[in-house]
Amino acid sequence: MLTDKLKETIRNAHKAIGENLPNYMPRKQQNLLVAEIAKTLAGEYSKDRRIITIEAGTGTGKSLAYCLSTIPLALAKSKKVCISTATVALQEQLVNKDLPFLKKYAGLNFEFVLAKGRQRYVCRQKLTQAVSTDSPQVGFTFAEKPKANDIRTLNAMHKALLDGSWQGDIDSWQSTLPQHIWHQVQCDKHSCLKHLSEHSHCPFHKARETMEQANVLVVNHSLLLADLELGGGRILSTPEDTYYVIDEAHHLPKVTRDHSSANMTLKGAIDWLKKISETGDKMAKLIKSQKAISPALKLADDCQDLLIEIQKVLTFIENNSAVYFPASHEDEQSNFKKNDEQVYRFENGIIPKTLKNWSHDIKELSKKTLSSLNKLYNILIEAVKEGDTQMYLAEPLLGEAGFLIQRLENLEALWTMYAKTDREHGAPTARWLENLTANDKRKRQDYMLCASPIDVGFALEDMLWSQCAGAVLCSATLMALNSFDHFRYQAGLRKDDGSQYQHVNSPFDYQKNAELVVAKMNNEPSSPEFTDELIEKIPSLLAQSKEQCASLVLFSSYWQMEKVAKSLRDDHQLKILVQGEDSRQYIIDKHKENCDNNKSSIIFGTQSFSEGLDLPGNYLTNLIITKLPFSVPTSPVEQAQAEHVTAKGGNPFMTLSVPDTSKKLVQACGRLLRNEKDTGQIFLLDKRAVTKRYGKQLLDSLPPFKRIIE
């Protein structure tokens, strides 16, 4: 429960923020959020389920609201706050602006840190060896021979790390580091170990110490999932001691699904599996102990058996390739015209019985091989710690073994998904094959096996919701068709389990500040004439504005965007900033420069420009959406989802596509008004918004703009 003292602390912090924030206006929406989050986490609604899901419109001040409610509570209860975001932009806003401001003025004594994955940090020991001309280390070789410029970069990195002018993370280095160089010196979990004296001062371990002292951790969704998959508390704080704030929560189900999927190439796996015995032998020789002999021999035997089983799978797929990939057999000389001709999805996730039997064997052999390699790895670590083996000799082998351990873990994960029998009434696992005959003739032909869960709600319940001290899920777009049902299903939440739900409207005056015009169009987007109609219609919409206008035109496909852009440039001499022609940041900077100089400016973009693009005030006054953002289920996972809904007697279009489109349309329209004084127009050029039954549902789920149907 919230004590009077805690309520007073939150009130005082909120008041102090208001007094020190320029142009601050009290908002009842923000007050409501602060109160509801605090009451939920304090257990006033449910002692067992301290979870609240919030859709908060633009301008509600949700980031300050969740900070003002979670941090005082966490300090009082000796918990940590873990704020997870989907975008770097929001992380930077929190770490560089919101949290420093809160710490300075709110009267709260807390520390915060931006937590990053291990691979974002340099390994001090590896970097030292890379720049040492007389290093005794055997095997420190680059995947690509370093150029003179690369060597200069490595020396500059080493010097900056030693003199303290660089903290050792890739993001704070002044220029882009080449991947082939970074991969050789980045921290890895298998050789860069804190308890080895040579690594105790590595930047990642120093960052971990800072994390342990911090009260607030800012992370991305991927790092959060990586920690939860390890059981929680291995990278970040333990779930039971943590209040989680999942901002941009609409991304969480997809990130979870990506983390839970696995794939492997057959010929590629055969290649690296052949190297495992050799690595085991080298480790055993270096250890010089009887303890290493048995696991080394077992590793060689298990690995040989594993190779035999995987070769059976390769032969089986090659023998059936005419069934799985008929397009490649119609004309051996031609490249595939469509991506789906290179993909074979097993209907309802059901694989042939022969493949299922091999799956069980490969799963068990992967587990055994992994166990033997882990034993050898741990014995070598002990030998180094006890001084029986020199670190510079062990390090390359630890790195090599670590690389193989990760691949074996992925191999076991994939074959576990192939071997398991899906629950009769549950969603099946999506399983599919890909033919990797590439257009690039230098690459050899191979087959990739893939698997992914369709629904990840149960995984989130198991890893996070049932384990955490409390959670706040928030975003400007969590509802679909004015309901939390779609998100609730995706995220593994329920209506009746004590979880709270709150929809908070934006304080903006939508009726007064913006109008949504559904333009009169002759053709539907599926019509061949639709693109020509866009070419005819868009110039007049761009010209409707005053002398200086900032426009964003959103397309559903690159080819359509490029065709319209070419025509408008050729026939109307319009200057257009087109996504893909320059970097996203350059386009935004150039657009703002045009607007600052009172010039009209036009951006053409696709779906990725409809989210996370912040163009306040005069930087955007005219938004044109060419088409309702329906996406065709092209990925095997999306197709498997649709198939599962159909099998249950549902309509995948209404169950999956329409709610998904509703969220995307809200996001797209959300580009226009970013502040309370912003004004402008939105033109929707898709007649289905008024001619189809679902069109009214989509329009009604938007903010209450003044609406004009032409």
Image (cartoon, rainbow, N blue to C red):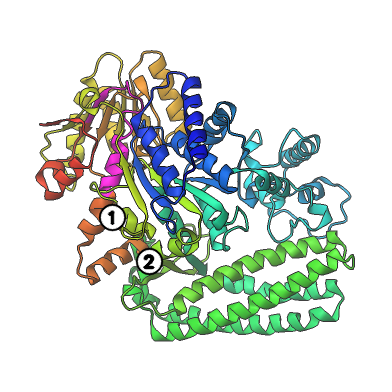
Could you tell me which secondary element the residue under label 1 belongs to? helix
The disc at residue 606 is none
The answer to whether one can see residue 168 in this image is yes
- Amino acid bearing label 2: Val
Using the image, determine if residue 676 lies above or below residue 457: above
Mark 2 residue crowding within 10 angstroms, few (<14) / some (14–19) / many (20+)? many
* 3D distance between C-alphas at marks 1 and 2: 32 Å
- In the picture, measured across the screen, residue 197 lies left or right of residue 639, that is right
Q: Nearer the viewer, residue 444 or 259?
A: 259
Give how far across and how far down residue 7 sits, in percent. Answer: 47, 37
Using the image, determine if residue 555 lies above or below residue 438: above
Q: What's the residue at 23%, 58% (across, down)?
A: 655
- Amino acid bearing label 1: Asp
Name which of mark 1 and mark 2 comes first in the sequence: 2
Q: Quadrant of residue 277?
A: bottom right
Give how far across and how far down residue 166 sits, in percent. Answer: 72, 36
User: Where does label 1 land, which residue?
Assistant: 485
Q: What's the residue at 37%, 48% (across, down)?
A: 53
The disc at residue 343 is 2
Residue range corresponding to the magenta coloring: 661-682
Give how far across and how far down residue 128 sits, in percent. Answer: 81, 47
